[in-house]
Image (spheres, rainbow, N blue to C red):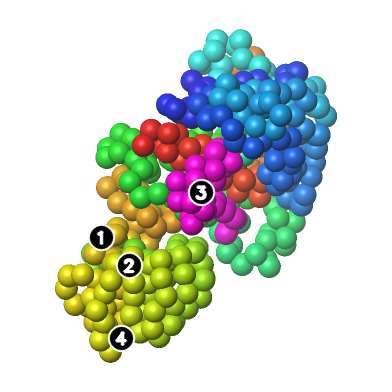
Amino acid sequence: MNAFGNIFRVSIFGESHGEQIGVVVDGLAPGIPLNEADFAADIARRRSGATGATPRVGADEPQSRSVGYEGYTTGAPLAIVFHNTNTRSQDYEALLNVPRPGHADYTANLKYGGFQDPRGGGHFSGRLTLPVVAAGVIAKKLLFATIAGATRGRVQFRCDARLVEIGGIADSAQWDAALDQAQKEGDSLGGVVECVVSGVPAGLGEPFWDSVESRLSHALFAIPGVRGVEFGDGFAAARMKGSEHNDVYAPAGCGGHGHGGCHEHGADHEGGCHEHGADHEGCCHEHGDHEGGCCHEHGEGEGCCHGGEEHDHEGGRCHGGEGHHEGGCCGYHRNRLVTPATNHAGGVTGGITNGNPLVFRVAFKPTSRIAKAQETYDFAKGEMTSLQVPGRHDTCFALRTPVIVEAMAAIVLADLVGMA
């Protein structure tokens, strides 16, 4: 089907060379700031025309839309529509009886009995990821507002995807040369995108069918050309020992007990972890300053910590009302959640978010549409034939996909937050 989600629901429509494509988004809370300018940055990241991407360039601007009232969502469904421009449908006339290798021409014809729109790949085209990106913008806004509101601004949602490999090459300095060579040969290259999502609440997801990995994979594999998804260590985990892959739990917001600690937003630190990205030594803090290699909550102190209650302390060690802790750690962590001190699992344990950033990678196949001649079957003549596909294509369409990966991740998480 063309819809995804239980609470935050996204439905896409249209074909690559049809009059328009678009998306309807339902399940939005009222009062979320949203205007036309919010879509510009992510749509620009997906836009074609750069080195290695298709030369087909369209305006990609929402032409008619329903995005709320006076700059805010109303709680009603939103509709965003894009008009298709700069199409060359004549390039596809010779392909009606000759399916292109790697494309959905043959399977689409089987499923829809010849009634599908074959121009530009029709509803199977990567063009349909444009309204997905628009839905992703809305999902990001929803998540940012929901998570910031629930934590009084202490935690901020952030989703960052980037291309980490092209054609098996991880060194970005070599990518242009590889793209140029593939283009000269009339061929194409694949790529790998890594996505890191921070500020994700612990406890999202379900075991088995609705695990976070299951839901994300469902959405990510809907992106045309995806051939693999892995979380955390991914397939490398099969070559590791349990002692290497297991994530050790440590108090959330405190990385004592000799485990080195973890962090949520990537800032460097020594001896502990933090939740807001501030650099510090010895331990961590929440809501305030600290001195003397330990931390506190809602207060100031030297050599020890405060968790909102009175504590006795000696020599830089803390008493949180019960028990004694050594090593410059905090007493208040007893009543707080723990967080894995490493992230081999990619932020998900047992199908449920564990408080660490989500980390996953998506493998994209080489562009199927290439200029190099390929063998295929001619249904009109009933024989094999050599096919050289005319028109425009991406040498590496993975170049344009990081923002699409972000959009799919945000759509899934917005739905999971709504279900929580």
Horizontally, residue 416 falls left or right of residue 49, namely left
Q: Which residue is mark 2?
A: 307
Where does residue 354 sit, x and y in percent of width and height?
Answer: 33, 53
In the image, residue 145 lies in the stretch drawn in magenta = yes
Distance between mark 1 and mark 4 Cα atoms: 21 Å
Looking at the rendered structure, the kind of residue marked 2 is: Gly
Q: Quadrant of residue 380?
A: top right
25 falls in the magenta region: no
Q: Which residue is mark 3?
A: 148
Q: Which mark is residue 266?
A: none
Q: Which residue occupies the foreground of this view, 307 or 196? A: 307
Occupied quadrant, residue 381: top right
The answer to whether residue 42 is left or right of residue 58 is left
Labels 4 and 3 touching (C-beta < 8 A): no
Determine the secondary structure under disc 2. Answer: loop
Q: Earlier in the sequence, mark 1 or mark 4?
A: 4
Residue 342 point in image, percent of width and height: 35, 66
Mark 4 = which residue?
316
Mark earlier in primary sequence (1, 2): 2
What span is in magenta?
A: 138-165
Residue 335 numbered mark, or none: 1
Residue under the point 75% across and 18% down? 19
Question: Residue 16's spot in the image, x, y percent?
Answer: 69, 25
Q: Is residue 144 above or below residue 328?
A: above
Identity of the residue drawn at 21% across and 70% down: 321
Front-most of residues 417 and 134: 417
Residue, x 48% and y 57% (percent of image)? 154
Q: Are marks 1 and 2 in contact (CB under 8 Å)?
A: yes
